[in-house]
Image: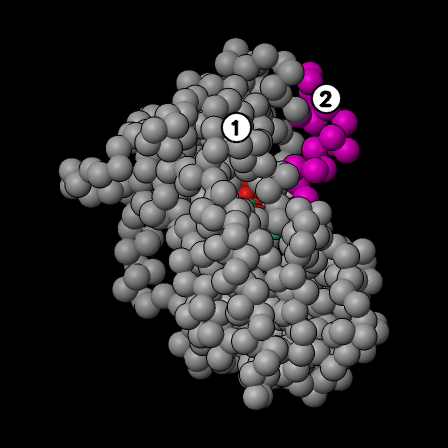
Amino acid sequence: RRWSHSPAGLTGLNSVTEEDLAHFAKILPSSSILSTLSPSATPSSELEPFNNDWMDKYHGKSTTVLKPRTTQEVSEIVRWCNQRKIGIVPQGGNTGLVGGGVPIQDELILSLANMAKVRSFDDVSGILVADAGCILQSLTDYLAPHHHIVPLDLGAKGSCQIGGNVSTNAGGLRLLRYGSLHGSVLGLEVVLPDGTVLDQLTSLRKDNTGYDLKQLFIGAEGTLGIVTGVSILAAPAPQASNNVMLALPKFENVQPLYKEVKRQLSEVLSAFEFIDRTVYDLAVKHGQGRALNPQDIEGAECFVLVETSGGNREHDEQKLNSLLESLMLAEEPLINTGVLASSPAQFSALWAIREGLTEAVSKEGKAYKYDISVPLNKFQEVVDKTREHLRSKDLLHENAVKYVVGYGHVGDGNLHLNVVAAAYTPEIEAALEPFVYELVASYRGSISAEHGIGVMKTHALQYSKSPTSIEWMKKIKALFDPNGIMNPGKVLP
Ligand code: FAD
Ligand code: 2HG
Ligand code: ZN
């Protein structure tokens, strides 16, 4: 494989002009238009949150953000941009971690933030239909009194939008239980790059009428169209949830532990999350969740957070207690200790450690994030080999790379390798890439288990996709978006 990482140039696309703004003003009220171009002249500081990503790693130079309120408005904007060959970046909550949601140059940003209504919910079938701009947490809150939950949960739930989740095919903390969005999304409404509205917003559990077009937009990262509505199968809310944080003396115990936990908890197991010692210590340092008793976890090399969700509290607690008992009393125990939540507050505090890892890492420094699929027994090896590689390049010190950590979703075989540096520098990037991608390929893994390709990995796609697959991806892109206006420079090399 040849390695080249030159920033994508967006040839053949036009910048937004004052004439374009005058046209947008016929479609949208002035409150839905932010632009540094006169006559609106929004201060550029107001565009910064849209131009910069969550990690402060990717920076765009867009002059204009539009916030349509209806699918019709989205369609009219897109139709105009297609005629005028103006690049569009669809943006949800801007929590993406691969630079997909911010412009590369001065593309127009189309924010879904003003499309945030629940369209319908059927508490018999559990089918929820919502605007793409609904924030994930607000959907969870909406469903709670109806005793249902969104079949997806992640640390960014307070900001990310369901349209962004669908567009990144977000995995999250309970994929092990509820499966991928490719299964739970029943239908989509999408504005295609020529402005046509593709209405596939069915509320049917079963529909085998030919090609399932909606699947193409799940994980397309806004390169094929703008998702404006989502129909999703909500899950019944569990009657009882519980969790336990297990401290392990060594990484090698994770795999046998996972087997044992699956065997004993079977149908009530809903999460099994891995946290290495270094990132646990960072979470504690930066005040995420409540630290476990330091004496209890002395010598622990890593942690696992196990969650149960079931229909009968007594039955689930009994299962969890007997699991803990058998683990502690085993001749060669796989764990040092286990902290079982005994109240809703403790339950949340344990989850807060896991959900707060991304934030803890970002408080510590600038993170190079590799979200990869590798065999479970290689998780630690990947972290160790990366650390050793950086050490060999003399880059492992306070002023360069401070920490190399690993955490992730064991049930999904998904490791989050985070390299925490003092600053983003070309030197560190050159040491990490293609090193990490070569390593992943040597295990026949995936270079993106859940966060997507965005702008970060376009040049590395070939590590996980064959030339034939990439060729057909390009053909599909050209078919939907012959002018290349939809999130240009993202996903495809
Ligand atoms: P954005 O960041 O705005 O956009 C992401 C991509 O989708 C971009 O390419 C954008 O152009 C496109 N897009 C957004 N909305 C639309 C739309 N309506 N139509 C078409 N394209 C659109 N990811 C996981 O998979 N699992 C996790 O556990 C997880 N945890 C996270 C925790 C934290 C603290 C953070 C900051 C991020 C996490 N992420 C996780 C990454 C991120 O992918 C998710 O947060 C989320 O799915 C992105 O949604 P968003 O609305 O913020 O999308
Ligand atoms: C998670 O699982 C998210 O917490 C974010 O996918 C991972 O911070 C990361 O690298
Ligand atoms: Zn994740």
User: With 204 as the anchor, is 195 left or right in this view?
Assistant: right
The residue sitting at 47% across, 28% down in the picture is 146
The residue sitting at 44% across, 74% down in the picture is 259
- The local secondary structure at tag 1 comes to helix
Q: Is residue 306 magenta?
A: no
Q: Is residue 53 magenta?
A: yes
User: With 147 as the anchor, is 278 left or right in this view?
Assistant: right
| Magenta-drawn segment | 35-54
Front residue of 248 and 128: 248
Camera sees residue 447: no
The residue sitting at 40% across, 58% down in the picture is 267
**Mark 1 to mark 2: distance in Å?**
44 Å
Between tags 1 and 2, which lies in front?
1
Q: Name the amino acid, label 2.
A: Ala
**In x, y percent, where is residue 214?**
31, 40
Q: Name the amino acid, label 1.
A: Pro
Residue that label 1 marks: 145
Residue that label 2 marks: 41
**Residue 372: numbered disc:** none
**In x, y percent, where is residue 410?**
50, 67
Front residue of 365 and 316: 316
